[in-house]
Every structure is written in structure tokens, then in C-alpha cells.
Amino acid sequence: MCNDVGGFGQVVSVSGVRHSVDSIPSTVGGSVESGAAAEFEVFYRANVGVVSAFFARRCSEPQLVADLTSEVFLQALASLDSYDPDRGSARGWLFGIVRRVWAQHCERAARGREAITALAAHRQLGDDEIEDIATRIDAQRTARDLLAAWEGLSDLERAALELVDLTGLEPREAASVLGISAGALRVRLFRARKRLGKPQENR
Amino acid sequence: MSNFEDQLWSQLVRERGEQMRAAPEATAALGSSVTATRPPTRRGPRLRRPALLTGSALGIAGLATAGVFALTSSSPAFAVTKNPDGTVAITLSDLSSLPALNQKLAQDGVPVTAVPISTSCSATGAITNLSGESTPSISASGQETTDVVTIDPSQIPSGEVGVLGASQTASGQIELMFGDTTPPAPSCLNSARVTPTQDRHAKVRGRQGRDRAASR
């Protein structure tokens, strides 16, 4: 896990174009499209919460959580052709992107570069959105503490535990995200739970 | 739906709606996946959970987990599958196939000996107590694709061998338990000294495991 970039209330330096909240169309709060967009909206709304929670466990700055969440769906849209239902679940595919976006962010942060540089649709959050995401960050505080306490685990064990126990992926989905077999995932999951003294679950 | 999520969706539609419309098949698959990934409906009755065994209660520490398989007369007796990551998946549906299973394990270079668990067995002294950390990891899955007991041989301490205990319940199910010991492995395990704990973690449904247990 790389360090957070910026504390709460700070604006992460970005080079992307920012749009004011006022520029956002008023067609929010429900299905606004039909056809392909409506299909993607179903997928988006089913997953945006767990995606933002993934970043809320790692970042304390709402703007960064928003940027990374946005980046995930932007990359998903840019790589729709890469989704093959025969190769795994849609959620597993999406979390592959989630992990890639986080890794890209960490790499940039490690190099001292701007944390977010590729967000074409980056926009500055409105106050209500900041409050919204700050609430999510607070809600993930316990999970964030857990992640910090998992230092004794291997990266793979920690990732398996987070994807299955915190994110809610099925083991086979988590295995797909991590590029290992379902059996290997279960071994890591069992080992991680055992080390943490966590009751084993039937999944 | 929260304010942030609504705002982001609106922005995606406005700025990337064309990408969505350009890939109708992919978006349809993604949309339909949401329904498909909702909590699964189990296809059959769940068998009882297997038990985790503790060495202190048994003198057999290191027994890590157990899997339960239902028996059918038509199902293949066992399967040993080596995964690319080095783990080994084992299924068993007939105690009479233990010799053949051991032959297969030896043939594949898997340092595990399968033995029966019985009430009359007195050969349990060879099992070595192990700490929890060094207990070999086992995963017995209830997922449709992984109804097997999976062993990670790399976790067996150097100089020791794995022991896979197998017993048959009154209902005909096969119960598998795994531990490790200093060689030679015992010829059997005594069920009276095998006490389940509350630390249960594995589930295995029999049908899918049986259906895939094809590599004799």
C-alpha cells in the first residue's frame, strides 16, 4: 500500500481539466440513458460503491478518492473490448482495473509526480460531494486500521483478505483479479485468516 | 445513490457516452452480469461442515481441515490435480481407493500419504505436533468450481510428510483431514483422538466434486 497523498482538505495537484459542479448536467439520480449506456449504468451503480470504498480505505482525501474512482470507470470504458465474460466475472474484471489504477497512482506518488495526471474528466468536487466521500472515508476507518494491522501478511494474503472479506468478491472473482487459481486463493485466505485469528468463513 | 455517484455518472454519460454506445455487446454483458453476480442460489443441499482438528486434543496437531464429500456409486473414486501455483487439489469418494490414491500421489511426487481414520487404529503416535503457523494450509471449497481439498505441499515442513486422513460417515460421506508428521506416515488415524473444534472454515458440497473427480 502506498502512502496517502495529501491530507484531508488538501487539493491534490493535478493537471487534468477541472469542471465545476455547475457544469454537470442536471440529469442525475436515475437512469438517464437507454440502450448501451443504460446497461453500463446498471453495472456502474452496482459497483461504484465498492470501488470508492476500496480507495477510501487507502486515502483520507476526498478529492483523491473521487479522482481514483473516476479513473477506474474511465479506464473501464476505454477498455470495454477487453471484457470477456468467458474469462471471468465483470466484477473481477473491474477490480483488475481498480488494482491497476491504484498501482499507477502509487507509482506516480513514489516518483514524486503528480498523483493524478491522466484524468481527462477530472473535476473538482462540490462541497456536498466532499461531505459524501468524507463520510465514506470515515466509514472505512475501521477497515483502514485493519489494513494497517495486516503488515505481517504477504501482499497476496492481504489482497485476498481485502477482496473477499472487505470488498465482498467471491473467492473465484478475487482469484481472477489476483491472477491465481481459486484453490490458491483459498489457501492464502485460510492462511491470512488463521494468522489474524479471524474465524474462518465458508467462502 | 449518493450525490458523488450521481454526479460522476452524469459526467461519464456526458463525456464518455459515445464509448458506451460504441460497445453495445460489452455493456450488455456488464449490465447482465449484475444480476448474474447477485447472491448465488445453491444447487443442492449443503452437507455438514467439516471440522478443523487440533493437535492438543488429539496428539495430532497439524491436522488443518477437513472436507466432506458425498458418495455415489457412479462417481470416480478420486482425483489428484496439480495446480500451476504448486498446490494440489485432492478429491476422494471411496475409501477402498486409498491405495490407488497413494499410488497416484507418489507418482505425482506429492509428499502426502492418505490413510483411513478408524476407531480401532492405534498408530497415531507418529504424528508430530506443529505450531499453528506452520500448519499446512488447506482449502476445502464450497464453490462450484473448486469442490476439492487443496493442499500446499510447500507448507509442509522440511523432513516431514503430509497425512491425509479419510473416514466415511454413517450417511456415506467421505471426511478428509490433513496434517503432517515425521516419516514414516502412520498407517491409520484413530477417530477417537480426533476432536472437531469450533474453528470451522471449510465446506464442500459433494456433487460438483464428484462430477469433476475424473483424473484417476
Image: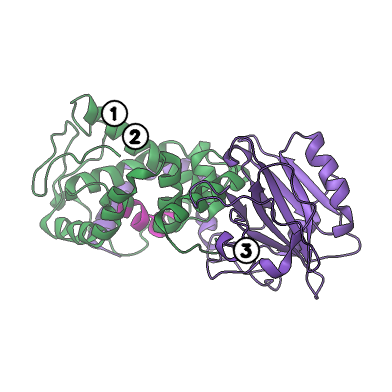
Chain colours: A green, B purple
Amino acid type for the residue under numbered disc 1: Glu
Dot label at residue B58: 3
* Dots 3 and 1 on the same chain: no
Q: Is residue A43 magenta?
A: yes
Amino acid type for the residue under numbered disc 2: Ala
Left or right, residue B17 beside residue B71: left
Q: Residue at x 44, y 56 (%)?
A: A38
Q: Which residue is drawn at 38% across and 36% down?
A: A100
Range covered by the magenta-colored residues: A41-53
Question: What x and y, as percent, mark residue B195?
Answer: 63, 69
| SS category of the residue bearing label 3 | helix
Look at the picture and state if B26 lies above or below B188.
above
Dot label at residue A107: 1
Q: Which chain carries label 2?
A: A
What's the distance in space between the residues labelled 3 and 1, CA to CA? Answer: 50 Å
**Discs 1, 2 touching: Cβ within 8 Å:** yes
Q: Is residue B4 visible?
A: yes
Amino acid type for the residue under numbered disc 3: Leu
Look at the picture and state if B205 lies above or below A65.
below
Left or right, residue A84 beside residue B189: left
Give A137 or B15, whichever is nearer the viewer: A137
Question: What x and y, as percent, mark residue B183?
Answer: 71, 41
Left or right, residue B93 beside residue B27: right
Q: How crowded is mark 1: few (under 14 residues within 10 Å), some or many (20 or more)?
A: some
Q: Which of marks 2 and 3 is in front?
A: 3
What's the distance in space between the residues labelled 1 and 2, CA to CA? Answer: 6 Å
The dominant secondary structure in magenta is helix
Q: Which residue is drawn at 11% across and 45% down?
A: A7
Question: What x and y, as percent, mark residue A195?
Answer: 43, 52
| SS category of the residue bearing label 2 | helix
* Dots 2 and 3 on the same chain: no
* Dots 1 and 2 on the same chain: yes
